[in-house]
Amino acid sequence: MFTGPKPPQEPGDPGEPDDVSRRLLAALVCSALEPSLTGVLLFDLPPEHFSAVAGVFTQVLGRAAGHDEELTVPQAVLDAATVDEELWIRPRVRRSGQGIEFTFGPGPLVETDDAPQLVVVPDLARLSIPGMRAAIQLLGADTATLEHSGIRHRWRPRARWLACCRSEDAGLLSPHLLDRFPLRLAVPDLRPEPGSAPLGALPADWAAALDPSAPRPRTALTDELAPAVLEYLVDQESGGQRRVLALARIARALARLDGAGPAAADGVPLGGPIQVTAIHVGRAARLISLRSLHPPAAPPDEAPAWDVPERPDPGRDLSRPEPRTGTERGTEPGIPVHDPESAVPLGQTPVAGERPAPAAPYPEDITGPGPDGATLRIPTRRAVGARASRGPVVGVRRARDLWDLAMVRTAMEAAKHRARRGGSGPLLILPQDLRGYVRAPEPVRMLTLLLDHTCRGDQDWSATLEPFLHWAYVTRAAVHVVEVGGAGETNELRAGGFTARSTRDPRIAAALARPPGRATPLAHGLDRAAHALRRTFRHHRAGLVEALLVAVTDGRGNVPLAMSRTGRQDRVPVQRAGVDDALAVAARIRAMDRSRLHCVVVDPGRHPYTRLPAALAEALGCGVVAVQGEREPWADDEWRVARHG
């Protein structure tokens, strides 16, 4: 067990823990000390170091509970295979007078005593739906009740959760699930030390604060606490109030660590109640790498061991938008929605495939929140039967086998001959009365069209899109259309769309002739297309064998993804925010199953940003096709060119 201060070491000694290790150890101690900080989420933690971090967290929780060195805190591991029965109940075997009996007892997530417990999730993005529901129900809850299989139990959840997730997967998770983890750290550079103290030795003051036998002094909140917290989170309204409470609670935990110092004869720390000030808020923000435009200055002599001065960020701070004025180069005051023909310098074009740096500790603000209508219900899957028996019902015919019988029509057919077969008595059904459903074949291919109406001008897209529509018609593929910047939209900051069973749907022709609007929420359109592809690949009853994404756009997105989600226009110039969000979403589409998904970008050739379609195509990992005014001889080969990139 790690106790006491480390012996002095020479500078540059590899055994000296780095800043990441100190911050992570401080976060684990704060979680064990503060009852409200029950969830710890680590972004980009190397998988080989997860067991070491979980072991340190177990030791910290054991020390906070007063356990001896040899006692460990029980752990419950949740993964993609976790089901409800494994969480809330567990079978038990006992011997009785009648022999061996099998009963049910509380499961691993049910706390029957005050003993500490640790729930570990190696990959939060791959956690099963029952596990996600359990996390939302327990993390931050005041009480929990279990009524299952004759068991009735009520408790106050105090178990700690340790989860890991990649930054790029944050946009795929439910915002309700992410909000349940108040302590978040990005630790891609974590390098634990070998031995019993992978994150370094526990300072003596921290060990004293964790000692359950030591007196716990009261904490008093100062008047400057609330303004200091809002200074960091004033521009993150989409995160709700949980982020504000989390930062304040982390500051209170750090204040308790500072208060574990010299004590008077009666055991009460010198100076009375512990004052939680703006200095503690600044340390809490630096602990989780939360930046502010004007962070409160912390005196160097009061900074804890893990606290280091902030280094200047060479790139743009993406955790919160920077205020700009009309005097800056490349900006102009006014609303962030520009007319399609306005030309504003966008700055340097990023390298293909390059995504903005994650906004620790809230990377979902850059990747965008989860798709609209995301649910925590387990999707219905049907894995038995042939593909022909899974499509929508279009009629009834005489049954050829005993699969997929139409019971109502079968009973009606038998009732026609009831008088001739005996009249009264039970209904007699003969083999010739059996009727089965006639089902339309389930499509196994899908064409996704993204139409950016603001770049149409006087061009006709029919000739360019004809090969792709012809492929969808011949292969009986479903068609999903996403419209960006069309006239008549209910909210011009968001993309619209619909799904058609075939290319003969009249809504497709209407979409190809829709006049342009004013805004271009390209990032939201790509996000909707990605959600449709992901949902169809995973939840489709028949399972897609191939999908094609065709994006007709000039790449000029002037609406950021966060603005499309909220539906509100912020009075801040957009500049490259919409373009960067579109490239980030395109990179996530590229990470899908490349053996079944093919992409192509149709470039309308609009000036002055002629390189934006190429940058979008490189982010998607596909080729570019130019819009043609009339049919060219090579038009039939466009699908082959797009397929091979």
Image: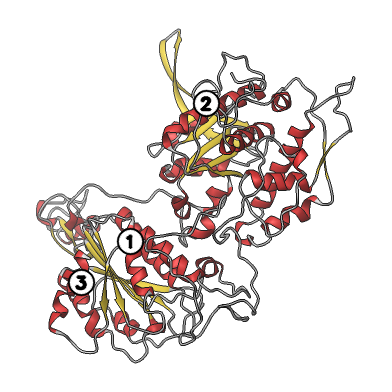
74 relative position to 595: left or right? right
Residue 17 x/y as whole percent:
57, 31
170 relative position to 27: left or right? left
| For residue 571, above or below residue 84 | below
Q: Nearer the viewer, residue 605 or 461?
A: 605
Q: Nearer the viewer, residue 145 or 181?
A: 181
Query: Which image quarter holds the N terminus?
Result: top right
Residue topped by disc 2:
55
| For residue 248, above or below residue 54 | below
Tag 2: amino acid? Gly
The Cα atoms of the two marked residues, 2 and 1, are separated by 39 Å
Report which quarter residue 240 is drawn in.
Answer: bottom right
Residue topped by disc 3:
472
SS for dot 3: helix
Categorize mark 3 by other alpha carbons within 10 Å: few (<14), some (14-19), many (20+).
Answer: many
Q: Is residue 603 visible?
A: yes
